[in-house]
Amino acid sequence: RTTQLDDRNADGRPDSTLFYDAAESPTQLEEDTNLDGENDKWITYRDGKTAIVEQDRDFDGDRDLRVELDPEGAKLLEQQDTNKDAKYDVAIHFEKDGKTLGRQEQDANKDGKVDRWIQFRSGKRTTQLDDRNADGRPDSTLFYDAAESPTQLEEDTNLDGENDKWITYR
C-alpha cells in the first residue's frame, strides 16, 4: 500500500509518498524536497525505524549522499559522491555514538578504488595513508598531533614496500 502525503505546491502530484509492507509497517518514503516534480530524498525503514537516508543534494537526478543509521538513529556510515560521477567516492565511518568520526576512506584520484584512508581518535585526525601508485597499498603515511597538525610523513618513494623517506614537521 502507498500513501500520498502532501502536495505542497498544488501541482496535482504528490511531493512525498510513503510505502508500506503487508504488515502495514512503513518501508520507504520518497520525497520531492525542492518541488521540481522529481524525487530527491529517499528514506528506507527497517522495523518502523529509519535505516537509510539517500539524497540527490544537487538535484541532477543522481543520489550523491547515503547515510546508514543504527536502530537508535545514530550514524554508522555516510557515503558521498563529491565529483558528480554518480559513484560514492568518500565513505565516513562513525563511532558508536553516531557523531564521532572513526575513519574515512576516499577515492582521491577518482579511479573507482579507495586510495586514501584517514584514521581518527576521539573525532580528531591521527593518520592519513595514501596509495599514490594505485596498487591498493599505502605508500605514504602522514601523522597528526592532537591539534590535527601534521607531525611526520613517512614515504616509500621507490615502492618496494619499505619506507625510505621521513620528514618531521615542527
Image (cartoon, rainbow, N blue to C red):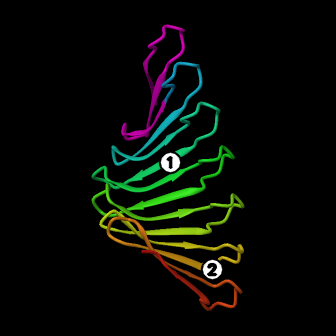
Q: Nearer the viewer, mark 1 or mark 2?
A: 2
**Residue 38: image x %, image y %?**
59, 25
Residue toward you, 123 or 49: 123
User: Which amino acid type is shown beneath numbered disc 2?
Assistant: Arg
**Residue 119: image x %, image y %?**
43, 70
Q: Secondary structure at mark 1?
A: strand
**Residue 153: image x %, image y %?**
52, 78
Residue toward you, 102 or 55: 102
Task: Identify the residue at image location x=56%, y=36%.
Answer: 56
Q: Is residue 154 above or below residue 20?
A: below
Q: Secondary structure at mark 2?
A: loop
Task: Identify the residue at image location x=59%, y=47%.
Answer: 82
Task: Identify the residue at image location x=54%, y=32%.
Answer: 40
Q: Earlier in the sequence, mark 1 or mark 2?
A: 1
Based on the displayed image, in which of its 4 quarters is residue 159 positioned? bottom right
Which stretch did the figure color magenta? 1-30
**Residue 72: image x %, image y %?**
27, 52
Q: Is residue 152 above or below residue 46?
A: below
Q: Which mark is residue 15?
A: none
User: Which amino acid type is shown beneath numbered disc 1?
Assistant: Arg
Q: Residues within 10 Å of mark 1 (few under 14, many from 20)?
A: many
Q: Which residue is mark 2?
A: 137
Residue toward you, 87 or 143: 143
Label 1 to label 2: alpha-carbon separation: 26 Å
Assign the C terminus to one quadrant of the image: bottom left
Is mark 1 in CB contact (under 8 Å) with mark 2? no
Q: Which residue is mark 1?
A: 66
Q: Is residue 85 above or below residue 28?
A: below
> Would you say residue 18 sits in the magenta stretch?
yes
